[in-house]
Amino acid sequence: MPVEVDRREAAAAAPDVVVAGLFEGEGKDPAFPAGSAPDDAATGGLLRPAWQRGEVRGRRGEVTVFHRPDGRGRWMTVGLGPRARLSNEGIRGAAAQAIRAVRGKGARSLGFRFASFVTERTPAADAARALVDGAVLGGYEFLRYRTTADPGVEEVTLFLGAEHAADERRLAAEVKEERFVAENVVWTREIGNLPADTATPQRLAEIARELGKEVGLKVTVFDEEALARMGCGGLLAVGGGSIHPPRMIVLEYPGGRQRGRTVAVVGKGITFDSGGISIKPAAKMSDMKFDKSGAVAVLGILRAAARLKVPPRVIGVLCCAENLPSGSSYRPGDVVRTYSGRTIEVLNTDAEGRVVLADGLGYVSKEYRPDAIVDLATLTGAQVVALGDDTAGLVANDDRLAADLLAASAATGEPLWRMPLTDYHRELVKSDLADVRNSTEIPVAGMLTAAAFLESFVGPGIRWAHLDIAGPGWTSKLTRRYQPAYQNLGATGFGVRTLLHYLRQPAE
């Protein structure tokens, strides 16, 4: 979606809809916000009386539409809540609300009255980026298989007005860059939403190769024969029941001009998860096409890293397989030998994500010795129980790495919460038959025992963080009601903006 900057006053332009932020008043008889005087004028004096009657209050989530008396389109106010509490995340949500409110209502162009979103807490550059995020992400819907669809906004403009016209060049640069970041998430969502009959492990490998040619990445794909030679028993076991064989996909970005650290991002890419022999209930099994969300996020991270030329060298590893039951499936009770030589006792074939990640973590640890590894995986239902659908679980073996990821999370509005990892959890995943087991007999701390399992495949001395994105990796019709307005139905691309922000920070 094109997003432009225009130095004119919003009232002087004529997009189909102009959107202005409206702050919530305080007290029993709140005064009309002085900063909303231009909006009252643009509506022909209708906004102030509506405020005085209590019809409009500026509460978060409130959307009010006026038809301009001069016939030049519509003027919309979106509630921002109290001025002192406005955040970048609040602006993202408000922008997305505006975009969604006019879908299917004849609006092709939409403009934001930029000054109405700028405060001491949200300076101009931050407000511009947040508006772009909200507009682009909020305007996205997965339409590939629709024969008809409600038309939405096709172009967005930030009208700077007299307050910010002098900063036009700087803000235009901010908008251009953030538009790419947001559209990169949309690109990631498109792949994440593909059904399992399309997004097979081999198809993800083809997408990775196409991406490599597009942005200049080295791409290596290990097929089932190569995986067997390498000893990647985890991927082979999980993918053994499907006619679509597993793949390990490795993408390499060499780093920007000031090269330094090497960061690896490893993603769980289960293109469909039936549970295997330990089959899942039929209800909601269709959602299991989203079990590739971690690996798809890795594609988006590498794409953005290369385009924006982030300083570190970045290695992306996608551990892709389809987990289905058949005569060739792996079974409860099997012992699997992984790339690192460590063995896994399989107690539950539905705990397959950690089994494929064992190969990816072992491979990248040995072959690249990165300074840090971050894995992303829709790994456990326990994460959703503990933290809900909006917040990912963070487990790390290094405090500085954890702090950097939490800072990136705060900047991008993708919530993370750090969880503990102790010897208690490590003891629970030890096996009497093999090195570790992929499930435990005690049904507690499932997110943390999964993290303890993964940690055992990270090379010694390597800083590592695990992001369990089972909740925020996708949204359903139910959970979308409680998510920010810029989260679409289906794959969310969660983690792409956070990891990109982390990669763009100066070396430690």
Image: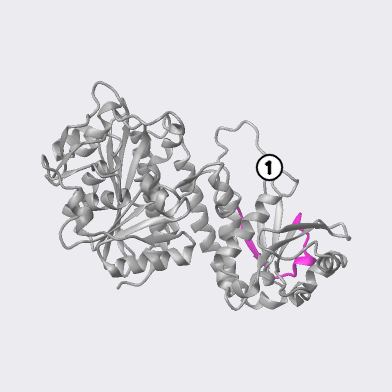
Q: What x and y, as percent, mark residue 4?
A: 63, 61
Task: Answer with left or right where residue 350 lies relative to residue 35.
Answer: left
Task: Answer with left or right where residue 497 lies relative to residue 165.
Answer: left
- Identify the residue at horizontal 52%, vertical 42% (top origin): 476
- Foreground pick, 162 / 498: 498
Q: What x and y, as percent, mark residue 413?
A: 49, 62
Task: Quadrant for the C terminus, please.
Answer: bottom left
- Identify the residue at horizontal 39%, vertical 66% (top origin): 406
Label 1: how many Cα within 10 Å (few below 14, some 14–19, many 20+): few
Q: What x and y, as percent, mark residue 404?
A: 35, 68
User: Against 471, is 461 above or below?
Assistant: below
- Identify the residue at horizontal 34%, vertical 65% (top origin): 256
Q: Is residue 344 magenta?
A: no
Secondary-structure class at tag 1: loop
Asked which colour scheme the image uses, the reply is one colour
Asked which quadrant contains residue 309, the reply is bottom left
Q: Amino acid at mark 1?
A: Pro
Task: Answer with left or right where residue 78 lies relative to residue 289.
Answer: right
Q: Which residue is mark 1?
A: 151
Residue segment shown in magenta: 1-17
Residue 455 visible in image: no
Asked which quadrant contains residue 460, the reply is bottom left
User: Against 341, is 288 above or below?
Assistant: above
Residue 318 visible in image: yes
Q: What x and y, as percent, mark residue 178?
A: 52, 62
Q: Is residue 8 magenta?
A: yes
- Total numbered badges shown on the rendered structure: 1
